[in-house]
Amino acid sequence: MKKIYQGILTIAFIFLFMLEVHAAPSTSFYTSSKYVESGSSVTATLRLTNTAAWNVKISSSGATSGCTTSFADATSNGQNTTKYLTVTCRATSTGTIYFSASGDATSSDGSTSNISTSASVTVTAPREKDSNNYLKSLSIKDYQITPEFNKETLEYSVTVPNTIEKVTLEGEAESRYASITGLGEVEVSEGKNAFDIKVLSETGVERIYKIVVNVEDENPIEKKIKDNTYTIMKNVKTIEPPKTYTATSIKIDNYDIPAFYSEISKYTLVGVRDNKGDSHLAIYDEKENTFTLYNETTSQEIFVFVKEPTEDLKGFKRTTKTINGESRECYVSNIDESIIVVYAMNIDTGENNYYYYDETNNTYTLYHDEIETSYAEQIEKYKMVILIFGGALVLFFLIIIILIFKRPKRKKKIEEIQPEIKVKEIKKEVKDEISSEKEKEPQEKPKKEKHKKKAKEKKEKETKIEPKVEEKKEEPKEEKKPEEKKNTKKSKEEALEQVNNATKIIEDYEKTIQLSKDELKKKKEELEKEETMYDIFEDERKRKRK
């Protein structure tokens, strides 16, 4: 009986194999979408089964630029296969895109099937991008969040038992064009666990919803770090250990707390949560029983932990900057505040050094104080040179201004004094001439008197001897007196005439001065311009020499 059953099965398998081998090629034709917007692309696909060779043409028409393509080929081994032939078209206007496929396909046994099929796509006008970034729903599977969901409310919370290690976040966006991140199954530990659900609209605008899952902790360990309260995490599954750190365990308030330790930095890190439910790492100092927030950053494979500066840095002043989302103390240059230096420990080597920090690229470079000191000294030198040069320029310009204002006054005084001096000189000359004439008169008087006396004595002698002749001789002598008076009168008239002439010359000179004032003024202005140009030229020549 068993043999009969096996024989029947064998015959059935052979029959089925013969049916597959001798099956004719089959086709199906479809598009990537039934509706597209103008300007978008759409793909048409022809699926061939049980085919070893094919000769097909796929054409397009209507609201498209066209994408007609021919396909003619065969399998390399002559065996049947499944083949996908595709064309992609771009919609150029509203309306309909028509696709058609025609040709034939042949199977390995020689069976041929004719192909004639079609498909269509509706093209609509482009729509405006959707800016909706709201959630339609938000929940935690098997738990009720508070407050009740409202798309305008961004923060929610829920409390779960301390036995729960995972919860599932569920939600849906209002717009089918929006994308969501942050949903699904997430791990939780004791205390507050914060999760962000981000909704990104089609226009690129993001909205963030926040859920805090509070896992009940019957004995929370709370510690103060920089005046803020943090809760020690008793489960650090959600925290990735930093580089060079390995998992360990320590005692805090008689509780076994999971931690991380590095042989290089010699730091012990524990997980802490703030009052918002966000988790952080903190350095635990077992001797001092203190905690310091740990902020590790990387720059070109340099891992550093930014520490609080303990000393002042020459040429820098202390300030605070946001580094990796946290406010940290650092130094900024007194010359350029874009130059930032932080005090940090290299995680790989454990060495503490100063590092330049680039805010834009979030990178670190080892700080060299020699370079900075040299740079500062050069700047100070340049400042001194600039100050000296600036002072010299100011002094030089002041001197020029003083000379410009002083020279015209001096010229004016000279011009005013010169006519007066000339008038005085002429008057003096006239006076000197008159006085010289007067001086001559007293000298001539004694001579005349002496001459007169001699003439009288001679007359008396002649009178005694020849009285008649005396009268004849006296007449011409007496006639000389009027001539002398006449000469004196003439010299006075000449002196007066010279005075009058001099006065006339002075009056004419004053008139000439009066008439040429405008001309002198013009010449003075021209001279001042020439002097100014000369001064500018001299200044430029001196500056070039320097």
Image (tube, rainbow, N blue to C red):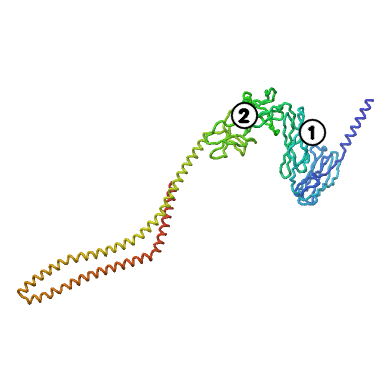
Does residue 487 appear to the left or right of 259 in the view shown? left
Q: Can residue 537 be seen at all in this image of the molecule? A: no
Per the rendering, the mark at residue 143 is 1
> Residue 278: where, in percent of width, then height?
69, 33
Kind of residue sitting beneath label 1 = Tyr
Res 18 quadrant in image: top right
Mark 1 or mark 2, whichever is nearer to me: 1
> Residue 254: where, in percent of width, then height?
69, 22
Quadrant, the N terminus:
top right
Instruction: Measure the alpha-carbon separation of dots 1 and 2.
Output: 42 Å
Res 136 quadrant in image: top right
Residue holding disc 2 = 347
Crowding at label 1, few (<14), some or many (≥20) Cα neighbours within 10 Å? few
> Residue 516: where, in percent of width, then height?
38, 64
Depth order, front residue of 44/382: 382
Q: Secondary structure at mark 1?
A: loop
Q: Residue at the spot x=86%, y=36% of the render?
A: 21
Q: Secondary structure at mark 2?
A: loop
Depth order, front residue of 416/392: 416
Total number of numbered discs in the rendering: 2
